[in-house]
Amino acid sequence: MKFFRRQPPSLPSNEPPYPFITIGHVQNDVEQPAPRNWEETASSIILKDEYAAGLTGLAGFERITVVCWLDRVPESARKAVALGPGWAPGMPAVGVFATRTQFRPNPISITVVELLRIEGNLVRVLGLDVINKTPVLDIRPYLPPYDSYPDAGLPPWVYGPNGNK
């Protein structure tokens, strides 16, 4: 994978830190990130006991959005702002914000997953694209009237080197 370095930040150097707390962690059989069929990957999200009550009412949703901190993305990979043509065969160089790569300035994962069941502080899901022990920052219900735009347009390069759907 080819990376381009970012330019020096234009933000003031006195930017305050943004504290995050983890509400739990992921448990699954995936130990190393790699291309795979994440849609078939079953995971458990184990919430800290003090957040279990926050799951009340979530069981009726078919899908949820899970926000994770990709804690094992190396600092050097967080400096990329564009991916070279080698990021996927036949694809053009694009900015990191035009991809779903984990190599981001802030390695945050946001994934819509299928909610299988909730048991106490354990949330069973299907399709979460993170590895074992990944910290979880948030869980939200997936609301189709607000979260889904099936007719949203995409640039042709998304469909592959020929731009065909």
Image: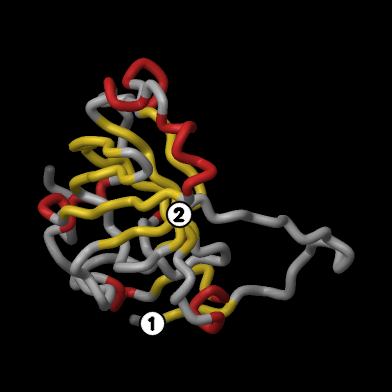
Tell me, for residue 2, which label it has, or none. Answer: 1
Tell me, for residue 99, which label it has, or none. Answer: none
Q: From the viewer's perspective, tell me whether residue 99 is left or right of residue 119.
A: right
Residue name at image x 49 percent, y 60 percent: 69
Q: CA distance from mark 2 to mark 1?
A: 33 Å
Query: Where's the N terminus, which quadrant?
Result: bottom left
Q: From the viewer's perspective, tell me whether residue 136 is left or right of residue 45.
A: right
Q: Say which residue label 2 marks.
A: 24
Regarding mark 1 in the picture, which secondary structure is present there? Answer: loop
Q: From the viewer's perspective, tell me whether residue 32 is left or right of residue 24.
A: left
User: Measured from the top left, where is residue 146 in percent x and y?
Assistant: 41, 20
Does 8 sit above or below residue 54?
A: below
Does 33 sit above or below residue 156?
A: below
User: Measured from the top left, where is residue 149 in percent x and y?
Assistant: 32, 25
User: Measured from the top left, where is residue 154 in percent x and y?
Assistant: 31, 40
Asked whether residue 60 is in view, the answer is yes
Residue name at image x 57 percent, y 66 percent: 105
Q: Amino acid at mark 1?
A: Lys
Is 163 in front, or is 42? 42
Is 123 in front, or is 94? 123
Query: Based on the displayed image, in which of its 4 quarters is residue 162 positioned?
Result: bottom left
Query: Based on the displayed image, in which of its 4 quarters is residue 37 positioned?
Result: bottom left
